[in-house]
Image (cartoon, rainbow, N blue to C red):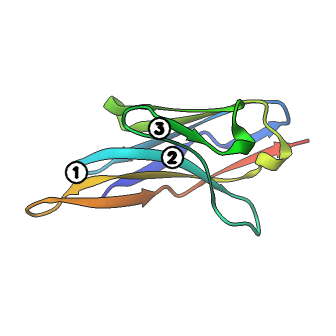
Amino acid sequence: QVQLVESGGGLVQAGGSLRLSCTASGNGFRLNAMGWYRQAPGKQRDLVASITRGDNTNYAYSVKGRFTISRDNAKNTVYLQMSSLKSEDTAVYYCNAEGQSMGSIMWVPFRSWGQGTQVTVSS
């Protein structure tokens, strides 16, 4: 089973920056796409940004030009650098990873979620 642990959330003033990190751990796995989602109170969980193993990225329109997603494959870690933060960026941010894990005799696809980290932007 692949576990994701996030860090880096917190309280920041509007216009400020935060960097989120998420590290995958477990036995016998390989990661493909990784990404960040967010969920504000009373709203659905939406994609913020994603990145493939080959560093192809995709961003939600609302964060383009302000957020940057990156990854370190050697560390099984994905980052989200958030700048020019706005009050509407306030949400719980969840890390997501897809890949394959080693079963008893073959690779098995998986999709894992982190526990979430709170980001609060004060205006």
Q: What residue did someone put label 1 on?
A: 27
Locate residue 9, reporting x and y percent: 65, 43
Name which residue lies at 76% across and 69% down: 42
Q: Earlier in the sequence, mark 2 or mark 3?
A: 2
Above or below: residue 85 compared with residue 119: above
Q: Are marks 2 and 3 in contact (CB under 8 Å)?
A: yes
**Secondary element at image label 1:** loop
Residue at the spot of label 3: 78
Q: Nearer the viewer, mark 2 or mark 3?
A: 2
Residue sticking out furthest to the right? 123
Q: In the rendered image, which residue does mark 2 sit on?
A: 35
Q: Amino acid at mark 1?
A: Asn
CA separation, marks 1 and 2? 21 Å
- Give 123 or 60, whichever is nearer the viewer: 60
- Of pointers 1 and 2, the one earlier in the residue sequence: 1
What residue lies at 71% left-to-right and 39% top-to-bottom?
63
In contact (CB < 8 Å): disc 1 and disc 3: no
Q: CA distance from mark 1 to mark 3?
A: 18 Å
Q: Could you tell whether 110 is left or right of 63 in the image?
A: left
Label 2 to label 3: alpha-carbon separation: 7 Å
